[in-house]
Structure formats: C-alpha cells, structure tokens
Image: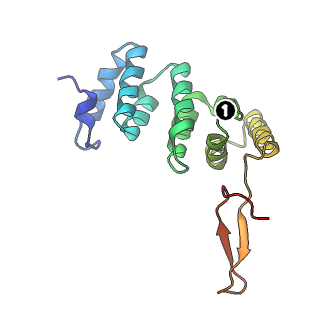
Amino acid sequence: MEITVKDLVGKTGADVNVEELKKQLRRLPEAERFSFIQECLAHGLISWALALAKSCLRSGEYVARLLEHGLRVADASSIKYWLECAVAKLGGRRVVRIVASQLESNPEGVAKAVYWLPGLLSRKELKTAAAFDELVRAAGEKGILRKPKVMPNPDKPGHVLFGNVWAEDDT
C-alpha cells in the first residue's frame, strides 16, 4: 500500500512503517521525492520532511533549495534541524556558502544559522573552518550578528539581565 503525505499527518515514526516509506520514495525519480518532501512541508510536517530528505534525497541541488527555504521560514530553534540535514547531505563548506549567499537577502536567517553552525561543523576541516570564520566576519561587518544586551540586575547585585538583541538601541 502506498503511503501518502496525508497518512503522515499527526503520526510519529512509531505509527508509520518508516522503512517502507523510505523504500517507496527511493523507487521514485528524484524530482518526485523532492515534491513529496515539499508536500510534507506544505502540511507543516517539518520533522518528516527533514528526516526523509536526509535519507532519500540524492541531489545536492534539492537539498540546497530545502536549506534556503529553511533559512527563510525556520525559527531560531528549528533552524538547527534544517542545518543538520543540509550538513549531512552537502558537507559543511557548501552549507556555509549557501548561508553566506543569504547575507543580503535574509540577514536574520543568517544570524540564526551562525548561532548553530559551530556545533555542526568540524573545526578539523580547515577550509570549512576558514569559510565559517569569513561568514562570521562578513555578518559582523554588516551588523547582522548582535551582541547580547546586558544590564545589571537591580534586584540581585552581581547578576545581569539580558535584553532583546533585536530591539532598537535606546542609547
């Protein structure tokens, strides 16, 4: 029996034969696999989409498009999962290049990605580390990376409070 995206709505991996779904997708042409994953995203099934992309997509172009979409739509926490999927499929250096290509058009997405990337990239890969360092430098020059706003806590001497880094400066 063929599994459809609608069969996944509200289901976990325990509710669906995941291996059968992966086999089903791998039998399809790459464009149809990507279409299935996009349909998962359209239904808000981000976890399913990323897990299937990680195990079934072969085309780096489709994974890159998926990452670009994630940079636009993911929140500060979930961007980590989009990046994990992309690093596993594309490698760290290519992911850094894709993120860097978004410096002008999607600075907030870049800032979110820069937060998570150090934990996902290998510092042993010197070219990847250099590319990431360059991304951080370029993002810093553009003012994309914000330093935390720290103020003394009036109720607890010696402690600090953190402010909203995206709020307008009041100085």
Q: Is residue 79 left or right of residue 96?
A: left
Picture quadrant where residue 44 is located = top left
Residue at 24% over, 32% down:
6
Q: Amino acid at mark 1?
A: Ser
Q: Residue furthest top?
A: 29
- Where does residue 35 sit, x and y in percent of width and height? 39, 21
The image quadrant where one finds the N terminus is top left
Q: Is residue 103 left or right of residue 70?
A: right
Residue at 66% over, 34% down:
99
Q: Is residue 30 left or right of residue 133?
A: left
- Where does residue 21 sit, x and y in percent of width and height? 29, 28
Residue at 72% over, 41% down:
124
The image quadrant where one finds the C terminus is bottom right
Q: Secondary structure at mark 1?
A: loop
Q: Which residue is mark 1?
A: 105
Q: Residue furthest left?
A: 1
How many numbered circles does the render carry? 1
Q: How is the image coloured?
A: rainbow
Q: Residues within 10 Å of mark 1 (few under 14, many from 20)?
A: few
- Where does residue 2 sit, x and y in percent of width and height? 21, 22
Q: Tell me: residue 124, above or below residue 24.
A: below
Q: Nearer the viewer, residue 169 or 15?
A: 169
- Where does residue 111 sit, x and y in percent of width and height? 66, 45
Residue at 74% over, 39% down:
132
